[in-house]
């Protein structure tokens, strides 16, 4: 079988995708140079206190506006290997759909009690857990009325495993028109948090989100 | 490649765009300058200091603002710090080889050491680009005037034009003695940089 590299797809109604997606098919990496393409990220845990709880800026500070939620799950690679000590960098918009980022010029409301940025490290069983505020959807393309559905950004680094992804929420009306969700097709389900009722009084609802880091790099040294 | 492949058990979570707002809060200057292990600490790796700089451009020739770049390279003796080199005598205790920076404008300046030639390879740095609008894309950057470029097994698979698109130009020394190399990365369009499929191949 002659294999060929992927032809990347462009997200419909996504101008940036149109501007930045390579048009040529990706080249296959020759086997004899393959190892050089596998970055191995050194373990480096950097967390301020209480970074797993994005619902408050710091302990004993008031709760941010909106609905507090829990997100938890495991991190594995395609072989099923649990990724221990994986760094998960998390960021999400506040209840109103605004990021605390100097380049977010949306003018949406900031919440003085919401930072929206945190980091957690998976435990020895590859488990992670964090609390945040259920993010607001926001209007990404005012000219055509396209909204970005509620989502949480997650960046996973663990040795040769690397993934940047987003967790979406089930049954959201804007999921169907999101350019990247459309490109995922049926496999979009894998990027949905699965809601569960929780008895923890501090959060309204929990979402299970098991992460599998795909690709050859993550299993290269196994 | 061996014919015996590991059985694939689990379906991967889809990659997704990084979006425009990768938090600057996650920046770490020790990942933006690999010539010192930490600001103000007198310890650093062996090797010729270099500054790799350039622009990341979109298909209209405009700067790709807000890109996250990750770098990976061998040390000055050509050894990668990875699980297959754990006890290698030529590992440099002050060098991991991994770097990361977010560029607000799309222009980048990365300070590191010139990687050594690893086995039959020419010195190179693997660059992974994360950005709004795309999932990650990957390429390798080479350096002008390296004899090994002529026999590099990856460069050999490319056309002359594509080889040029991956070879950083030498711009002379910086005031503090680093060799400055420049390469623009063109994400899409006529003069597109060759990208490699590290996911599938």
Image: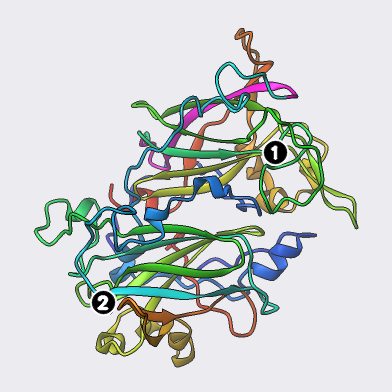
Cβ–Cβ below 8 Å for labels 1 and 2? no
> Residue B185 at what x, y percent from top left?
53, 76
Q: How is the image coloured?
A: rainbow
In which quarter of the view is residue B35 placed?
bottom left
Q: Give the quadrant of the C terminus of chain B.
A: bottom left
User: Residue B75: which quarter of the image?
Assistant: bottom left
Q: Position of residue B144 (x, y in %)?
A: 35, 87
Identify the secondary structure beneath mark 2. loop
Side of B174 relative to A173 (left or right): left
What residue do we see at 45% from left, 81% from top?
B182
Question: Image check: B60 left or right of B184?
Answer: right
Mark 1 burial class by Cα count in 10 Å: few <14, some 14-19, many 20+: many
Tell me, yes or no, if residue B10 can be seen here.
no
| Same-chain check, marks 1 and 2 | no
- Residue where numbered disc 1 is placed: A93
- The quadrant of the picture occupied by the N terminus of chain B is bottom left
In front of the other: B175 or A71? B175
What are the residue bounds of the magenta stretch? A65-81
| Up-down relation of residue B85 to residue B63 (above or below) | above
Kindly identify which numbered label has been placed on residue B121.
2
Relative image position of residue A105 (x, y in whole percent):
77, 52
Residue A73: x %, y % from top left: 51, 27
| Residue at the spot 65% in from the left edge and 22% down from the top edge | A69
* Location of residue B120 with respect to A40 vertically, above or below: below
**Residue at position x 37%, y 38% from top?**
A45
Residue A79 falls within the magenta-colored stretch: yes
Which numbered mark, 1 or 2, is in the foreground of this view? 1
């Amino acid at each position: 079988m002659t294999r060929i590299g992927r032809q990347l797809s462009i997200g419909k109604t996504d101008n940036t995708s149109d501007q930045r997606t390579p048009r040529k098919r990706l080249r296959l990496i020759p086997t004899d140079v393959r190892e050089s393409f596998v970055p191995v990220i050194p373990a480096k845990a950097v967390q301020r206190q209480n970074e797993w709880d994005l619902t408050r800026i710091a302990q004993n500070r008031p709760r941010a506006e909106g609905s507090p939620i829990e997100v938890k799950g495991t991190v594995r690679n395609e072989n099923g290997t649990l990724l221990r000590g994986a760094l998960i960098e998390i960021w999400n918009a506040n209840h109103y759909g605004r990021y605390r980022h100097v380049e977010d010029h949306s003018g949406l409301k900031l919440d003085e009690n919401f930072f929206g940025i945190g980091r957690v490290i998976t435990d020895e069983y590859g488990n992670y857990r964090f609390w945040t505020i259920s993010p607001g959807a926001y209007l990404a393309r005012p000219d055509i009325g396209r909204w970005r559905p509620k989502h949480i950004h997650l960046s996973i680094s663990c040795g040769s495993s690397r993934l940047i992804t987003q967790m979406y929420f089930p049954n959201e009306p804007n999921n169907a028109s999101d350019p990247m969700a459309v490109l995922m097709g049926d496999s979009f389900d894998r990027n949905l948090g699965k809601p569960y009722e929780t008895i923890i009084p501090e959060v309204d609802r929990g979402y299970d989100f098991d992460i599998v880091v795909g690709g050859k790099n993550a299993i290269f040294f196994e | 490649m061996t014919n015996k492949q590991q059985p694939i058990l689990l379906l991967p979570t889809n990659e997704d765009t990084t979006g425009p707002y990768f938090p600057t809060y996650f920046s770490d200057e020790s990942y933006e300058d690999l010539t010192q292990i930490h600001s103000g600490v007198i310890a650093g790796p062996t090797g010729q200091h270099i500054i790799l700089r350039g622009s990341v451009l979109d298909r209209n020739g405009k700067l790709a603002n807000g890109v996250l770049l990750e770098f990976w390279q061998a040390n000055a003796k050509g050894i990668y710090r990875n699980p297959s080199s754990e006890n290698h005598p030529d590992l440099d205790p002050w060098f991991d080889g991994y770097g990361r920076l977010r560029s607000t404008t799309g222009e980048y300046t990365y300070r590191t050491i010139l990687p050594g030639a690893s086995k039959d390879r020419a010195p190179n740095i693997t660059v992974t680009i994360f950005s709004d609008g795309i999932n990650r894309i990957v390429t390798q950057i080479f350096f002008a005037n390296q004899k090994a470029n002529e026999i590099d097994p990856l460069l050999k698979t490319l056309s002359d034009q594509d080889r040029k698109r991956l070879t950083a130009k030498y711009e002379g020394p910086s005031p503090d003695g680093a060799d400055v190399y420049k390469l623009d990365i063109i994400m899409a369009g006529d003069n597109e940089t060759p990208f490699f499929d590290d996911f599938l191949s």
